[in-house]
């Protein structure tokens, strides 16, 4: 009877650890993909910040204010609050990660 109970406990323990192993493996794989995406995002955020602080952004903003751009042109990047808030969200996320 003792060997049988020992085997049952081992089987239960192994099954529990296997479930943890599978979950950890799945989550780490997903996390690695997210890290790769975040690295791409980091480069894009640098470009957006550089654009937002540039003379080109001011020129583009002025053209939009003067009504010189096509009405169908998507221009969220010219929204002062929109781009500022996006950059601020990014900075907060970076702070949280540190």
Image (cartoon, grey):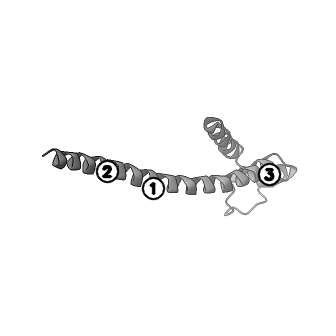
Viewer-nearest residue: 13 or 38 = 13
Question: Where is residue 3 shown, x and y percent of the image?
Answer: 18, 48
Is 72 left, or right, of 6 in this rendering? right
The alpha-carbon separation of the residues under discs 1 and 2 comes to: 18 Å
Q: Going from the N terminus, do you reach mark 1 or mark 2 first?
A: 2
Q: Residue at x 76, y 60 (%)?
A: 69
The quarter of the image holding the C terminus is top right
Q: Going from the N terminus, do you reach mark 2 or mark 3 first?
A: 2
Q: How many badges with numbers are in the image?
A: 3
Q: Secondary structure at mark 2?
A: helix
Of circles 1 and 3, which is in front? 1
For disc 1, the marked residue is 26
Q: Residue at x 50, y 52 (%)?
A: 28
For disc 2, the marked residue is 14
Residue count near mark 1 (Cα–Cα under 10 Å), binned few <14, some 14–19, many ≥20: few
Mark 2 near mark 3, Cβ–Cβ under 8 Å?
Answer: no
Viewer-nearest residue: 19 or 75 = 19
Mark 1 near mark 2, Cβ–Cβ under 8 Å?
Answer: no
Q: Residue at x 87, y 49 (%)?
A: 55
User: Among all residues in the image, which is located at the extreme right?
Assistant: 55
Q: Residue at x 46, y 54 (%)?
A: 25
For disc 3, the marked residue is 51
Q: Secondary structure at mark 1?
A: helix
The alpha-carbon separation of the residues under discs 2 and 3 comes to: 55 Å
Is 59 left, or right, of 79 in this rendering? right
Q: Secondary structure at mark 3?
A: helix
User: Among all residues in the image, which is located at the extreme left?
Assistant: 1
């Amino acid at each position: 009877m003792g060997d049988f109970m020992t085997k049952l406990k081992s089987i239960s323990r192994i099954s529990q650890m296997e479930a943890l192993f599978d979950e950890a493996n799945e989550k780490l794989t997903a996390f690695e993909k997210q890290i790769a995406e975040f690295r791409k995002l980091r480069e894009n955020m640098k470009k957006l910040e550089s654009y937002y602080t540039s003379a080109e952004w001011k020129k583009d903003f002025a053209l939009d204010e003067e009504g010189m751009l096509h009405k169908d042109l998507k221009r969220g990047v010219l929204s002062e609050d929109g781009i500022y808030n996006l950059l601020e969200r990014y900075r907060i996320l970076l702070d949280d990660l540190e």
